[in-house]
Image (cartoon, helix red, strand yellow):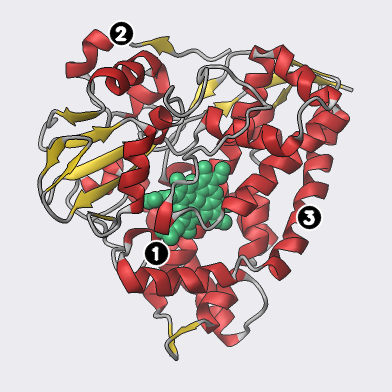
Amino acid sequence: MSTRTLVAPRSLAELDLADPRLHAEQDLSEVWRTLRRSEPVHRHRPVGRAPGFWVVTRFADAAEVYLDTDRFSSAGGNVLATLLQGGDSASGVMAAVTDGSRHRDLRSVLLKAFSPRVLTGVVQAVEQNSRELVNAALDQEVCDFAVDVAGKLPITVICDLLGVPVEDREFLLGLTKTALSSDTADQTPFEIWQARNDILSYFGKLAEERRRNPGTDAVSVLVTGTVGGQPLTQDEVVANCYSLILGGDETSRLSMIGAVLAFTEHPDQWAALKSGAVTVESAADEVLRWTTPAIHFGRTATQDSTLNGVRIAKGEIVTVWNASANRDEARFPDPDRFDLGRTPNKHLSFGHGPHYCVGAYLGKAEITAMLTALRDQVAAIEPAGPALPIYSNMLSGYRSLPVRLSR
Ligand code: HEM
């Protein structure tokens, strides 16, 4: 059972969407519904020293912001944490916070690390790992699905892809769990900064090692990759490794955990998966829409323009709430129904346009592999304790999910 309480829309003017506690402890579905209906491009008040920002909640408007990179730039940061602080130090070196032709260059090198040749082997390993992890969980009377199963799969996959030695993986998982979210409400900015710095210096050393001894892993692809005949700089290599490890671990993990929670709350959909009434591929897309692990992304307006009739001035921050857009009734019939057979199901969980997630194929393959292992090996899933949320304003999901799995 989730422990979130429903927020009434009348409190809209007092909400602080940048506060991680809000997303962890409260259910914002009524707030999103009201905004989509009556104020789809909403002005969020300034809080403390942080400036105000636009809150975009409808699917069509969100897609427009993602697509129009000339009008809405990622260079000032692409999440509230950096946008409200006035910028992202990785701008111009990390693909996710770079615009235009340099973004295309960096992205083309990143995509080489995701070539079908590399991914075929990775996906086979994901399928085998999923089966083994589910099997081990079945041997426990009660397992914490978030820790014992989902906590072990995506980190293994992304570390395999990056060629991170096995003995360093536990250390990196601790850091990735701290860098974008927290298990508690009282994490300090220093702890977050420290975790991010530790990840960067770890990949700085790994990159130097791979420069001397290149292999076939993604770090080697980045250190040997060239754009217009020029190699990537050390800063570019390290920043993009950072983005791969963070992008590659937490989002997929949160989706799988959310899937299992949803199965305990919607037994008819678990039965549909078990019986083969729905395919795992369509189930994976609905899990992605339903859980929406990355709840918002953001941009900076490069010029005065209008969005859905609302004037947005040059320099203003525009946030796009995937969590709302993925439940937009104008896009998804009966959007609050968890329906594994939903088609079409073109959600925004991986974003849209030029910055569309480079790991989308891999992320979906991981969720599909986990759903397949659950369907084939598990007869029943019963809740065995409360689901405990993570604290973040950009990711949503659970850090603990005690369940009883039976064969
Ligand atoms: C970009 C979500 C898995 C790496 C994005 C964006 C979203 C997203 C919404 C767009 C950001 C923006 O427009 O500013 C997700 C979700 C995942 C997932 C929900 C899993 C369920 C992965 C994986 C990797 C990854 C497995 C790497 C192995 C990246 C990178 C970008 C990105 C590098 C930046 C792309 C660019 O700016 O061109 N992701 N992601 N993601 N993702 Fe993912």
- Give the residue type at disc 3: Ala
**In 3D space, how far apart are the residues under numbered discs 3 and 2 (Cα atoms)?**
45 Å
- Per the rendering, the mark at residue 27 is none
- Dot 3 or dot 1: first in sequence order is 1
Furthest residue toward right: 407
**In 3D space, how far apart are the residues under numbered discs 2 and 1 (Cα atoms)?**
38 Å
Reading the image, the residue beneath label 1 is: 95
Reading the image, the residue beneath label 3 is: 125
Distance from mark 2 CB to nearest ligand 1 atom below 8 Å: no
Q: Residues within 10 Å of mark 2 (few under 14, many from 20)?
A: some
Residue 229 location in percent, x, y? 44, 91
Of residue 316 and residue 148, the one placed in the foreground of this image is 316
Residue 381 location in percent, x, y? 76, 18
- Give the residue type at disc 1: Ala
In which image quadrant can residue 328 be found? top left
Of residue 346 and residue 235, the one placed in the foreground of this image is 346
In which image quadrant can residue 13 be found? top left
Reading the image, the residue beneath label 2 is: 8
Disc 3 is placed on an element classified as helix
Of residue 18 and residue 149, the one placed in the foreground of this image is 18
Residue 207 location in percent, x, y? 51, 75
Of residue 52 and residue 165, the one placed in the foreground of this image is 52
Q: Is residue 270 left or right of residue 343?
A: right
- Give the residue type at disc 2: Ala
Disc 2 is placed on an element classified as loop
Residue 25 location in percent, x, y? 40, 18
Q: Is residue 272 left or right of residue 234?
A: right
